[in-house]
Image (cartoon, coloured by chain):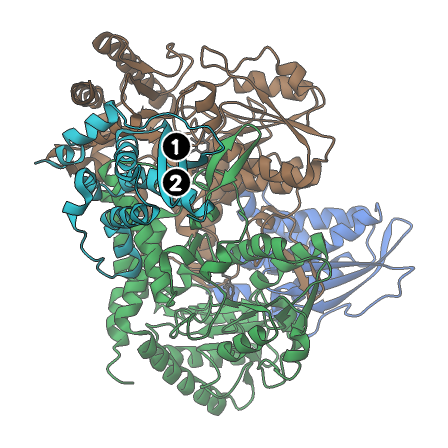
Chain colours: A brown, B green, C cyan, D blue
Amino acid sequence: MSSYDAQRVRADVPLLRRVIDGHPITYLDSASTALTPRPVIEAMSRYYETRHANVHRGVYTTAEEATASYEGARVAAGVFINARHPAQEIVFTKNTTESFNLLAKSWGRANLTSSDAIVLSEMEHHANLIPWFQLRDEIGFSIRFLPVGEDFRLDLGPLDQLLAGAKLLSVSAMSNVLGTINPVATLSAAAHAAGALIAVDAAQSVAHGVTDVQETDVDFLCFSAHKMMGPTGIGVFYAKRDIIANMPPFLGGGGMIADVRLDGYTPATGVERFEAGTPMIAEAVGLHAALRYLDNLGMSAIAEHERALTADALGRLRERFDGRVRVIGPADVHLRGGVLSLDVAGVHPHDVAQVLDQHGVCVRPGHHCAKPLMRRFDLPATARASFGAYSLTTDTDVLLDGLDHVLELFG
Amino acid sequence: MSSYDAQRVRADVPLLRRVIDGHPITYLDSASTALTPRPVIEAMSRYYETRHANVHRGVYTTAEEATASYEGARVAAGVFINARHPAQEIVFTKNTTESFNLLAKSWGRANLTSSDAIVLSEMEHHANLIPWFQLRDEIGFSIRFLPVGEDFRLDLGPLDQLLAGAKLLSVSAMSNVLGTINPVATLSAAAHAAGALIAVDAAQSVAHGVTDVQETDVDFLCFSAHKMMGPTGIGVFYAKRDIIANMPPFLGGGGMIADVRLDGYTPATGVERFEAGTPMIAEAVGLHAALRYLDNLGMSAIAEHERALTADALGRLRERFDGRVRVIGPADVHLRGGVLSLDVAGVHPHDVAQVLDQHGVCVRPGHHCAKPLMRRFDLPATARASFGAYSLTTDTDVLLDGLDHVLELFG
Amino acid sequence: MSNLEDLYREIILDHYRSPRNRGELPTPPAHQVEGFNPLCGDEITVYIDVSDGVLQDIKIAGHGCSISQSSASLMSAAVKGKPVSDVHATIDSFKRLMTVHESQLDDQVEPEPVDLRKLGELAALQGVVKFPVRIKCATLAWNTLTQGLSELNA
Amino acid sequence: MSNLEDLYREIILDHYRSPRNRGELPTPPAHQVEGFNPLCGDEITVYIDVSDGVLQDIKIAGHGCSISQSSASLMSAAVKGKPVSDVHATIDSFKRLMTVHESQLDDQVEPEPVDLRKLGELAALQGVVKFPVRIKCATLAWNTLTQGLSELNA
Ligand SMILES: Cc1ncc(COP(=O)(O)O)c(C=O)c1O
Ligand SMILES: Cc1ncc(COP(=O)(O)O)c(C=O)c1O
């Protein structure tokens, strides 16, 4: 597993010292939210302790420092995904979900009419579905769906046909249910060839491998800090400079205006046009620290580490349970990330998770905010185990023992 | 100044130990954002260290704890403003500004048509202006403005006339420029008598005195944690239960749905309908700690403390500068809070603030996101000094010495 | 008794493995109501046949975890053939059993204690209260039944 | 020299107290452009009269802080009567003087050093660079002039 040292990461994560009902915690829910390392927690505490102030509008020292921290985080977020113009292409939102609402309700509302179409996929998270449904209910464009095959991968067969006349393709880079990693560069090329733009939901992928918006030529990208060892309460919206420049405002309020009169207002011209009100300043500081932390680990090293964990877990699940525990997702670790949606024969995922909790194992039962995908595979829910930069094969050991108990209790 | 002990509060606020260019910091910008006491910082750190998990969807121990923390904060926020049904009347947003966007774009869009009218005031913050302008530009209702008199107070003379046929009165409880405290109960009674609802911008008032939505019979209330010694990144939207029950969703995504199909979705029925995506969990924990902190100090005691500081500062400014430094706002401390907008004769507020910074004094120059109000008084900007629970008369001493330097340099 | 054993009591596992009153009723004359637990994807359909002030028949369809399924099954056994007024009383008692946690959060008042003997087999579900997230599983069928009765003004 | 004295040099205070080229020009023939600094409320109107490739006249109206006002005044003195190509060169040099900070944030490249002698009195504004928030004050007039020239395709 190369020189990557997950034990060092574990030592940085205070929560991994928790003991649950006598068992040390086995955290396997990083796809929901990642645990937070000490440098991130401390960066935020230090911010509040030494330079907390409102940004953009102050001339005093701490206000300048807070502004520099906030804008520095913006640039860092842009650099992390290799944006060409980091300071002008990154908007901070509260989460991936708000980023998609911004996309739909600013770009979408300005660019879509009732005769237009967009293309989503059947494996999208609700974050990349509902904002479009809401806008569609308002202005009435059509939404087409790229299907998911029996192999748990996007079926690219009908892609060009679906893209014909469409204005946007909006898809996830990695499924939070199946673990499937989608071919973003291929999708991007197809979208552009059809004259459409491409938006990518990177919420799942961004903390588990390299993201490069220039190499993949992505027009919009959305992700959340809390899934990348950063804080809650902040997300990122990326859009290419030429595109964002023409997007109308979204939320209105202080900080996003050039002028305001009693009869109307003029929006500001930069990215601050999309950041109404006092922003998530400490959270931007925390995100910046998380990006630094991930950079130090190395995104390729993390990807490799998690791939090894996933290969190991897939193999052992297959051997030990002989079909009584199915993994809903691709079997090939080169097509997927470390998200293992488990279907335990005859046991509801909620009960699986409940019994596992008694072993200190944290997995998430449910539809994972992807109900259309669950229906596609006729599953009410799955029990999802997912890896992070701090995961170890010993986590898998505990999971497997817990699954034995599940089968024993409900068998 | 009763038994209130501002020195104790100061000891809790690490930032007050900063030294700026050889001067201990004199923080007079609490109207922008309040400094954060250690218990709030520590509550968030502890959250990340011991029970960080995504909420609402997990059955494992830390997920239950995180959910209980988040929902506990909701109830605490409701109790703090004396909401009748705390768990069902509070929505978490990212700030006051988003709260007003939620109000305008959910309630407003569902209830206003081109033949309707709403009433705002001339002293509103952009947060309570732009969302309405945006909605008006879309659906075309009319916006009427309650004027501000030469005494820096709302002119209630035309109130009933303005309210005739209006559906909503939306006003601030306290002006962030003038310091004026508006008569919320009177405004509420007038609005209801006219058949209108009332929304209150409590961003400025909430940390400086008692807020009671039942006593004042307020229908909607918006505020931000960062102005009440809480964290950045979280705000509150309150609406009466019967009203919020009928408001359509705002942002779409995970967590706000009852069901999702490829052809549409059904929203959830509770307040989670308005909280799409992973919420501000650590921030809710921080807000809860801030509410506890303020409760321990006592909101009436804080109000009294700040009133004494304000009276002292107003008197000394008048005596020492003999008209060369004007305070833009009511002179009577019973009509105002601790926000002092200064107009220094012949010196631009930006320069005032710059020189004061050299003394370690933090005041904010600008239009304070209230451009229409600035135009009303024909001011390009003011230099605003504002008090918090940790302020002392010695802060005023340093401010006054700094103003001497300003006048000397530019005199 | 560990929490887990308290949650998954034998009665509960029995009702989960062999649910009572499973199936559908023709509508009309029966009335059909659907319930969702959006958090975990549980879906339930309750069919009720009310006439002469009596819940003549009840059937349950849908899918869910052991707690939601066994609770639905236990509910159906408890209310079938009962006068509607008794059904409401049972619903009330059961909800009180389950809402300790929620009402504490909300109004900070102690709920009245519930007479467990009156609840009969339903009392087996009291272990759920220690698992706040599972309360929604246990109450899904009951909320759906309540809604159905109110749609019928029964 | 303290930072504050470096910011408020005598030349700057002089241009603030006695702004050059203050006023308006009749439009047409002059062209009028407005600029805002939304952060602090500064507003500026620049009137320019361009003909035969020369910025024949310039006037400045509006209000703002000592930095924005003196920068506008210094700018007007530096560009008035100059060929448009020289004006562009001056704008470029001045902006380079001011954008150290922003460009470092953005593209992480070191900007070319600026020849301060060529800037003349304008060099007095270099103290602003130590106060990142004030850079927007100093550049307001310049950005507004740039916009005006581009509207004229000059
Ligand atoms: C009166 C008033 N309303 C609204 C706001 C906006 O608050 P926020 O920036 O937290 O959204 C502020 C603070 O800037 C304010 O003072
Ligand atoms: C693929 C995907 N998209 C979007 C989201 C939404 O992220 P957030 O809840 O941070 O808005 C998630 C996480 O829940 C996700 O996994």
Query: Is A232 displayed left or right of D119 in the figure?
Result: left
Count the numbered circles shown.
2
The C terminus of chain A lies in quadrant: top left
Circle 2 is placed at which residue position? C144
**The disc labelled 2 sits on which kind of residue?**
Thr
Query: Do labels 2 and 1 touch, CB within 8 Å?
Result: yes
Quarter of the image for residue A297 reads top left
Q: Is residue B33 visible?
A: yes
Distance, label 2 to label 1, CA atoms, is: 8 Å
Residue B119 drawn at (x, y percent) = 64, 69
Residue A186 drawn at (x, y percent) = 57, 16
Chain hosting mark 2 = C
The crowding category of the residue bearing disc 2, from other C-alpha atoms within 10 Å (few below 14, some 14 to 19, many at least 20), is many
Circle 1 is placed at which residue position? C44
Tell which residue pokes out farthest to the front in this image. Answer: C52
- Relative to D57, does residue D96 appear above or below in the rendering? above
